Amino acid sequence: MSAPPALQIREANAHLAAVHRRAAELEARLDAAERTVSAQAERLALQDQQLRAALDELSHAKDREIAALQEQLLTSEATVHSLQAAVRQRDELIRQLQPRAKLLQDVCRRRPPLVALLADLAEAERLGPLPASDPGHLLPGGPGPPLANSTGEKVDQDQLQPTAFGTTV
């Protein structure tokens, strides 16, 4: 075999040098890309870690808030039950007091005539009994005009009891 001409060798050497430079360039670019990808992966991993930590903190905060709200709800429900029981007790007390209130209203409505009656009785007591020696006056238990009861019927004089004025209140 014969040796290749020098020009071909130089061209081949130049081509090999260019391929070698191109391979070195591509390797450098590949190394830079790998470093970039590695740095980005580290940043993504760090961001993922930070996001997970933030998510965990939010989850814990949400759980704490839910627990606080549940406790507040239980407290509110207990308060509601307590207030409902108090309302039932007061309603029962009102139900028990209503007849007494009606009676008191009736007494208050009847008070003025009672005051007048008591004043008349006090006046009658102040006047005292009739003297027994005066024949013109009727004595209790003695004959007198026929009396009528509240129904308008005549009452037999023997059924009536003699009365003396006095304060019984």
Image (cartoon, rainbow, N blue to C red):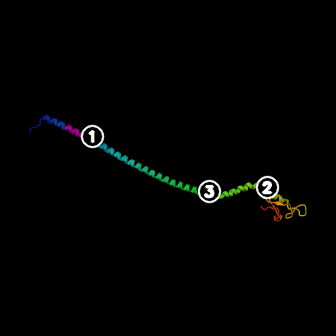
Asked where in the image residue 135 lies, by quadrant, the reply is bottom right
Question: Residue most toward the left?
Answer: 1
Q: What residue does disc 1 label?
A: 29
Could you tell me which residue is drawn at 74 percent across and 55 percent down? 110
- SS type, badge 2: helix
Three-letter amino acid code at the position of disc 1: Arg
The span picked out in magenta is: 17-24
Classify mark 3: residues with Cα within 10 Å, few (<14), some (14-19) or many (20+). Answer: few
- SS type, badge 3: helix
Query: Residue 91 — which label?
Result: 3
N-terminal-most mark, 1 or 2 = 1
- Decide if residue 30 is on the left or right side of residue 43: left
Three-letter amino acid code at the position of disc 3: Asp
Query: Residue 44 — which label?
Result: none
Q: Label 3, label 1: how many angstroms apart (C-alpha)?
A: 89 Å
Image location of residue 6, percent across then percent down: 13, 35
Three-letter amino acid code at the position of disc 2: Ala
Q: What residue does disc 2 label?
A: 116
Q: Label 1, label 2: how many angstroms apart (C-alpha)?
A: 123 Å
Q: Is residue 85 found inside the magenta-colored segment of the image?
A: no
Asked where in the image residue 98 lies, by quadrant, the reply is bottom right
Image location of residue 16, percent across then percent down: 18, 38
The majority secondary structure of the magenta stretch comes to helix
Image location of residue 48, percent across then percent down: 37, 47
Could you tell me which residue is drawn at 79 percent across and 55 percent down? 116
